[in-house]
Amino acid sequence: EPEVTQTPSHQVTQMGQEVILRCVPISNHLYFYWYRQILGQKVEFLVSFYNNEISEKSEIFDDQFSVERPDGSNFTLKIRSTKLEDSAMYFCASSASLPEAFFGQGTRLTVV
Amino acid sequence: AQKITQTQPGMFVQEKEAVTLDCTYDTSDPSYGLFWYKQPSSGEMIFLIYQGSYDQQNATEGRYSLNFQKARKSANLVISASQLGDSAMYFCAMREGARSNFNKFYFGSGTKLNVKP
């Protein structure tokens, strides 16, 4: 069964460093998303991406965040200068014409 | 106002019994979709069941059913014959709008279900 794949599963980075979280969405999906879940809290929307551009972003998605689809398969989230409060589980998701979105297994980002 | 409210932070159920996880939602859009996702301790988000706002019948998927009460704006998840593997966090979510299949999810705060042997 096709699935959304995220790498790495866990990343530890120093405050101020740049990180890139990678995702391979399901191949025939057209819409891509990043969500995050701070430990013990609800899942929050960050950004949606369609047709090689951002279609919607939340207030969390400020200038330190960017997304890119560098080739036909990968979808990346870059955090330019990480802060302690960026520590969270980051989920990539993709969807096609069906109502549900399929989520990856998440990348746990720890900023120290 | 919260788009999705889950009022049960934690629930216990005996193995083989049924359990209902509550979810209420808030939207003024006539077109929306309601979802339940399961998050085991390993962290991934697993899609369980979907209910469209125009669907006449309650959705069912195996042991999962969604008790959709539109007038009350509730979308409770019913798990029948609970199994130990059902122990997880459960999130209710909503997408709204005419193109709701592609819009962002609003998630509730989750309910942690523990199934006792």
Image (cartoon, coloured by chain):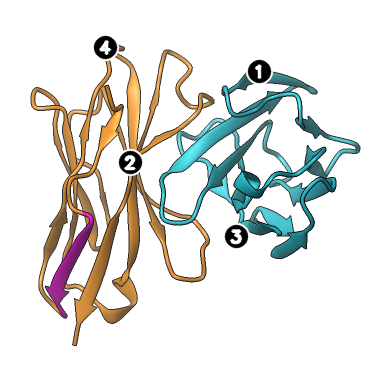
Residue at 28% x, 62% y: name it: B112
Q: What is the three-letter code of the residue carrying label 2?
A: Gly
Q: Nearer the viewer, residue A24 or B4?
A: B4
- Left or right: A84 in relation to B93: right
The picture's colour for chain B is orange
Q: Which residue is mark 3?
A: A105
Q: Are marks 2 and 4 in contact (CB under 8 Å)?
A: no
Task: Report crowding for label 2: few under 14, some 14 to 19, many 20 or more residues within 10 A (C-alpha).
Answer: many
Q: Which residue is mark 1?
A: A55
Give a yes or no on whether discs 4 and 3 share a subunit.
Answer: no
Q: Which residue is mark 4?
A: B28
Q: What is the three-letter code of the residue carrying label 4?
A: Ser
Residue at 71% x, 39% y: name it: A28
Give a yes or no on whether discs 1 and 4 share a subunit.
Answer: no
Give yes or no for residue B52 being in the magenta stretch. no
Give a yes or no on whether discs 3 and 2 share a subunit.
Answer: no
Which image quarter is the C terminus of chain B in? Answer: bottom left
Secondary structure category for the residue under label 2: loop
Q: Nearer the viewer, residue A39 or A22?
A: A39
Q: Which residue is mark 2?
A: B108
Q: Which residues are magenta?
A: B9-15
- Above or below, A43 against B43 in this view is above
